[in-house]
Amino acid sequence: MSKILITSALPYINGVPHLGHMVGCLLPSDVYARFMRMSGHDVLYIAGTDEHGTTSEVGALKEGISVEEYCDKYYARHVKTYEDFELSFDCFGRTSSEENKEVTYHIFEKLDENGFIEERTIKQVYSVDDGRFLADRYITGTCPYCGYDKARGDQCENCTKVLDPTELINPRSTISGSGNLEVRETKHLFLNLPKIEKRLSEWVASKEPYWPDVAYSIAKKWLKEGLQERCITRDLKWGFPVNKPGYEDKVFYVWFDAPIGYIGITKQWADQKPDERNWKEWWLDAKDVRYVEFMGKDNVPFHAIFFPAMLLGTGENWTFVDYLKGMSYLTFEGGKFSKSEHRGIFADKAVEEFPADYWRYWLMSNAPEASDSSFTFDSFAGMVNKDLNGVLGNFVSRVLKMTASKFGKEVPAGGEMTPLEKELAVNLQEKVNNYLKYMENMEIRKAMNELRSIWVDGNNYISAAEPWTVIKEDRERAAAILRVCINLIRIFAILSAPIMPKISEIMFSRLGLSSADMPGLKGFNVCQELQFLQPGHGFEPGDPLFERITPERLEELKLKYGSQEHK
């Protein structure tokens, strides 16, 4: 058994993630965590809300409440949304916690002691109309490198180039929209990345055989362009006050304390049961920990460059990411998700329309691994109706109803395995092995193709075996066929559990089983599993597993969520 540490990008506290956020980091990390637990590993899966910075200050100002109240309100919304989406965090914490403050101060002090912190007087953008210095991400303008006209002051989402706000062309405040901006001098602290660059380059180079191209190419691009000193303090009130004389009126930049938040959240988790848990066993001088991160490609530079550089600069033996699963973007009907323009469906609304497993299945089947993917309601309805209803749901329903009708609500006795069943077992074992391999390697779309193919094989088997015809002349043979099919339902439930945990639970329940009966995936033997449920074991046919999406419902969804064809 190995120790697997799993994290995803930390969602900003304001608002609720849309489907693009879910598929870009949160959902694949959950699927992987569930799979690794089922594979027998000791898994620690953590995330939390990213709460500091101007985002929270401005949001609270607009709502007329304190920043603390604002963060508490939206933290609760995040927690509920992720519970509804069936995300299985061991701890979903907050970057504003006292635990994170403690770790942030420690890392900063080590960097300062080791000579990686510099004091500088810089020019910073001040909004005259807003009466405040503007944080980088609250300045927008045209990117000087690619010409994208909605680039933020910290990074261009279009070309992923990290920016200084003074580089933007025609900058404006995103708080008020004012272009009445001035550049004023202010004193700040910088992390000297060039002094760490050599060691960081060697570390990144060691990841080439392992990291996916999306993550590795972005990291190499950053290093090729050369690292610059990075400002790690801000003129704000909300955040951790800088623990250095002369800087008490400033706070740490959100991108300094946010990645440290993974460590702080682990400490939160450990502090809940201090007699049983030790956060350092996962992060500091840790033994045998494999660390896997899931990030959208816009977050990759900070987790492939900035955070590792911070840890390297401490001179301590921190846990570094072993595998960074960088994901591309999910678009909505070919365009961007936009809450202000009522385009796209957000996670909290998605689960009001259909159960979470519908979305989980579609998103994982279309995960934007190597390139961008586009969500369309036509595709979503097509996969729900064809794959979930037509392949999986139809098989479960027809098998259980037919068995109940012909033999009663128990696994029927009689008959033996024939060459047809042995051929089925051989074919399924190959596909199961592929599925397990792809899941282990985080090749999500390949794994989903194998899973669907396994379901199809079950349908092909019952079509070839024809128990409805065989029963007229050989009741025992029909019983054997249906017994195999009922065991196939159990196999489908097991393999589907990381992707569709609630549907898997329902399938188990129909078979008179509970989550406590869920076996591990290590050494999964199809031939044995096809004979697991023995004659006399009870079951309930139940209602259909899935709701079919009608053409009328499809049009309603398109209109409601701003599909392009309804613009």
Image (cartoon, grey):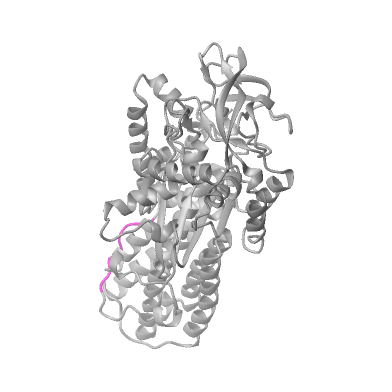
Give whichever of 173, 272 is nearer the camera. 272
Give whichever of 470, 381 is nearer the camera. 381
Residue depicted at x 66% and y 36%: 158
Q: Main secondary structure of the magenta part?
A: loop
Q: Is residue 539 magenta?
A: yes
Which quarter of the picture shows residue 485? bottom left
Q: Is residue 292 above or below residue 561?
A: below
Give whichever of 386, 184 is nearer the camera. 184
Residue 389 visible, this angle: no
Magenta segment boundaries in residue numbering: 538-545
Residue depicted at x 47% and y 25%: 236
Residue depicted at x 42% and y 28%: 238
Q: Position of residue 515 (x, y in %)?
A: 30, 64
Q: How many marks?
A: 0
Q: Quadrant of the N terminus?
A: bottom left
Q: Position of residue 367 (x, y in %)?
A: 56, 52
Seen in the image, is 401 located left or right of residue 429?
left
Which quarter of the picture shows residue 192? top right
Q: Is residue 69 magenta?
A: no
Q: Quadrant of the C terminus?
A: top right
Residue 275 visible, this angle: yes
Q: Position of residue 106 (x, y in %)?
A: 43, 45
